[in-house]
Image (tube, rainbow, N blue to C red):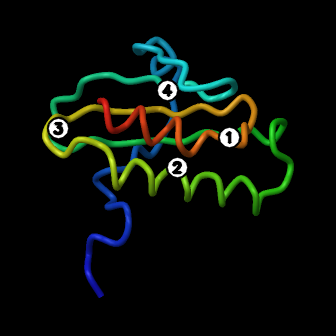
Amino acid sequence: MSSDLGLRKKNRIKRITKKMFEWERTAVCDGVVVFQKGSAKKESAILITIPKAVIKSAVTRNNIRRRAREIFRKNASKEGGIDFLVKFSSCPDNFDSKLEEFFKNV
């Protein structure tokens, strides 16, 4: 199996901190905000947060995380090292296309 079918560990941010919410903020669509900051690393990395208060079902939260990670993996620029925090405050139906458009233009 090819190694490019999943998100690599070096493309994942492990922990969330309060400083991340001070990064440059971009509203992708209603309910989805992306915080971004340049990084010294060569690879871009992502962290996706979906509060339990927004979506109760863990299965649904995990499916949304998987979809967002896949959009990032396919569309994010491979050159520059940028760290992203994707925060969901609601789950709009059309977030896939808006998030894909955002990562293509970064």
**Horizontal and vertical percent position of residue 10:** 28, 53
Q: Residues within 10 Å of mark 2 (few under 14, many from 20)?
A: some
**Which corner quadrant of the image does residue 6 belong to?**
bottom left
Q: Residues within 10 Å of mark 1 (few under 14, many from 20)?
A: many
Q: Amino acid at mark 3?
A: Lys
Q: In the image, what residue occupies the spot 65% across and 41% down?
A: 94
Q: Residues within 10 Å of mark 3 (few under 14, many from 20)?
A: few
> Disc 1 and disc 4: Cα gap in Å?
12 Å
> Disc 3 and disc 4: Cα gap in Å?
19 Å
Mark 3 touches mark 2? (CB < 8 Å): no
Mark closer to the observer (3, 2):
2
Report helix, strand or loop for mark 4. strand
Report helix, strand or loop for mark 2. helix
Q: Quadrant of the N terminus?
A: bottom left
Label located before the other in sequence (4 or 2): 4
Q: Which residue is the extreme one toward the bottom? A: 1
Mark closer to the observer (3, 4):
4
Towards the viewer: 8 or 60: 60
Label located before the other in sequence (3 or 2): 3
The residue indicated by pointer 4 is: 34
> Disc 1 and disc 3: Cα gap in Å?
25 Å
Q: Amino acid at mark 4?
A: Val
> Disc 4 and disc 2: Cα gap in Å?
11 Å
**Horizontal and vertical percent position of residue 92:** 72, 37
Please indicate whether residue 69 sits to the left or right of residue 5 in the image: right
**Which corner quadrant of the image does residue 32 belong to?**
top right
**Horizontal and vertical percent position of residue 17:** 50, 26
Q: Residues within 10 Å of mark 4 (few under 14, many from 20)?
A: many
Q: Amino acid at mark 1?
A: Ile
Instruction: Check the image and report above or below for 2 versus 6.
Output: below
Instruction: Check the image and report above or below for 9 versus 82.
Output: below
Label located before the other in sequence (3 or 4): 4
